Amino acid sequence: MMHPLAMDPGASGLCLVAWASTTVDSESAAQALAQAGVQARLAACAQVEKIHSHYWWDGQLQQADEWRITWKTTPQSLPALQRLLLPLHPYALPQWLWGETAASPAYAAWVAGEVGPALQA
């Protein structure tokens, strides 16, 4: 049975999953943030991947190795996930991107079923 939070009534068989993403400068910081969101049951999962970034900072073009964390959650849990993670973020100006994307019904139901149970206990 489909979890009601995962349903997108306008879609034909597809459901919505929310995602949030940020970057940090160390693998240990990435793992800590990933774990914090999942352990708090504000995300069903998090992926950590190493990337190489090019960006402007303090008027100079920079390059750096970074780690990107992407969490999968429900649209309703995005604000709480942000409130939890941004104070823990090591950057002065953290990248915090989010959105919604179509997902298979089974995956969306899994995400919705894993987000929040600890909050109701």
Image (cartoon, grey):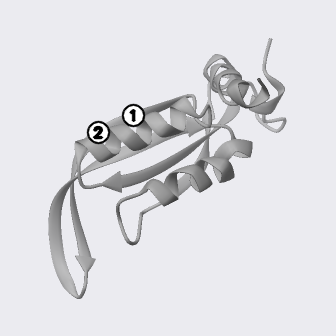
Q: Picture coordinates of residue 63 (x, y %)?
A: 15, 66
Q: Label 2, on which residue?
A: 49
Q: Picture coordinates of residue 91 (x, y %)?
A: 35, 65
Q: Label 1, on which residue?
A: 47
Dot 2: what SS? strand
How many neighbours does mark 2 have within 10 angstroms: few (below 14), some (14-19), or many (20 or more)? Answer: few
Dot 1: what SS? strand
Q: Picture coordinates of residue 80 (x, y %)?
A: 66, 49
Residue lying at 46% horizontally and 50% vertically, measured from the top left? 21
How many neighbours does mark 1 have within 10 angstroms: few (below 14), some (14-19), or many (20 or more)? Answer: some
Instruction: Please give left or right for residue 9 compared with residue 89 in the image.
Output: right
Q: CA distance from mark 1 to mark 2?
A: 7 Å
Instruction: Please give left or right for residue 36 compared with residue 61 in the image.
Output: right
Q: Nearer the viewer, residue 112 or 88?
A: 88
Residue lying at 74% horizontally and 44% vertically, measured from the top left? 76
Picture quadrant where residue 88 is located: bottom left
Q: Is residue 109 above or below residue 71?
A: above
Which residue type does callout 1 highlight? Gln
